[in-house]
Amino acid sequence: MNTLDREESEKFELRKQDHIKLSLDPRTEAREFNDLDQIDLIHDALPEINFDQVNPTVKTLGTELSVPMFVSSMTAGHSGSININEVLATVCSRRNWLMGVGSQRRELHDISAQSEWKRIRKIAPKVKLVGNIGISQLVISNMTDIQRLVDGLEATAVFVHTNPLQECFQPEGTPRFADGIRALEKLCREVRVPVILKEVGCGFSVSTLKKIKNIGLTAVDVAGRGGTHWGRIEGYRSQSNSLLYQAAQTFKDWGISTVESLRNGKAVNPDYELWASGGVRSGLDAAKLVAIGANLVGMARPILESAVEGEISLDKKMQRFEYEFKVAMMCTGAKTLADLQTGERWKLKKINSTFEDFI
């Protein structure tokens, strides 16, 4: 490795360490905009089912999962990610959760970075992994390289993350998004796994969701505002750069909430599944999002908090989320996920609305 490559590698390692540390910092959470707190599931005092009859399993991406919850993409490709991803993969495999991996950007130019996934596959050969590449990298990559990332991971599907706000404030950012939809459509046509488009915490508008209909996407993770805010993270990373730091403070509240983004998705009558993440902190939060239309619900920060503590801690956290989800189903009289999404299962606290009013 020459001096320049070594310097770039060291910068990459520091950036990823910053991301992990700051994603656990309360200052980077946009909790004040988490409108999940405004949704109540409606209690059924006579549900006419037994708890052991509650069935939260879901079929998606050609497989069946134990619950409609998944581990959102977090970190990959650096020395600090290996132990975290080993813990995540081990517990996800055991509990039959889908696991999104962190950005595989480094693997585009450093094939040795795939060794992380070979190691993961040895300890969790059956874990269902979803690959991950940024749309600004997708635009300038050929499909052969993207397929190589998918194959090296033995991925069930691939996330393409779109993060214009983060890229604008990241000192090393690549805010190049021209031709993104064209690149997405080509990827859907040529890659040999399902493609899921996701935001990273700023959500989706109706107009954006309309633009991506009929291009071949399997799902869209609306990933809205209400949890970790990557504009805030990059702002805190850029405190030595007054321009980036001050501008990031201006945009610290930017984005569309998770609930509103999901509502926007329902409004466009999509030809893709709607997944939701952003500010989900419990199994009850996940049940609320499924009730209003999400096929799957992703979690990151609460999972990372436990993963850094180790396998036992994470297993207990995920077990708790599963139990909370089933309790929410039981206490709304929903034996299946289809039941949870039909009838009067929820309302808004402030405007006592039905689902039809909400959309």
Image: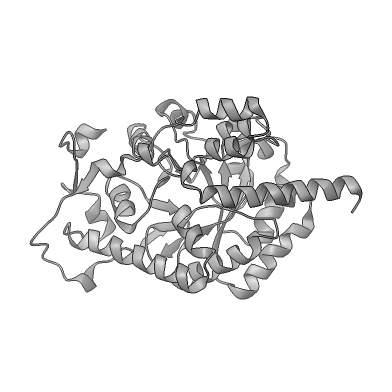
**Snapshot quadrant of residue 265:** top left
The residue positioned farthest toward the left in the image shown: 46
Residue drawn at (54%, 35%) of the image: 231
**Snapshot quadrant of residue 136:** top right
Where does residue 37 sit, x and y in percent of width and height?
Answer: 28, 44
148 displayed left or right of 59: right
* 119 to 223, vertically: above or below: below
**Snapshot quadrant of residue 302:** bottom left
Where does residue 278 sit, x and y in percent of width and height?
Answer: 43, 45
Residue drawn at (26%, 33%) of the image: 359
56 displayed left or right of 64: left
Residue drawn at (46%, 33%) of the image: 213
Image label count? 0
Instruction: Pick whichever, 25 or 218, lies toward us.
Output: 25
Could you tell me which quadrant the N terminus lies in?
bottom right
Where does residue 205 sit, x and y in percent of width and height?
Answer: 42, 29
* 171 to 63, vertically: above or below: above
Instruction: Pick whichever, 126 or 11, lies toward us.
Output: 11
* 103 to 249, vertically: above or below: below
User: Does residue 109 show up?
Assistant: no
Where does residue 72 sit, x and y in percent of width and height?
Answer: 50, 53
- The colour scheme of the drawn protein is one colour
User: Does residue 102 show up?
Assistant: yes
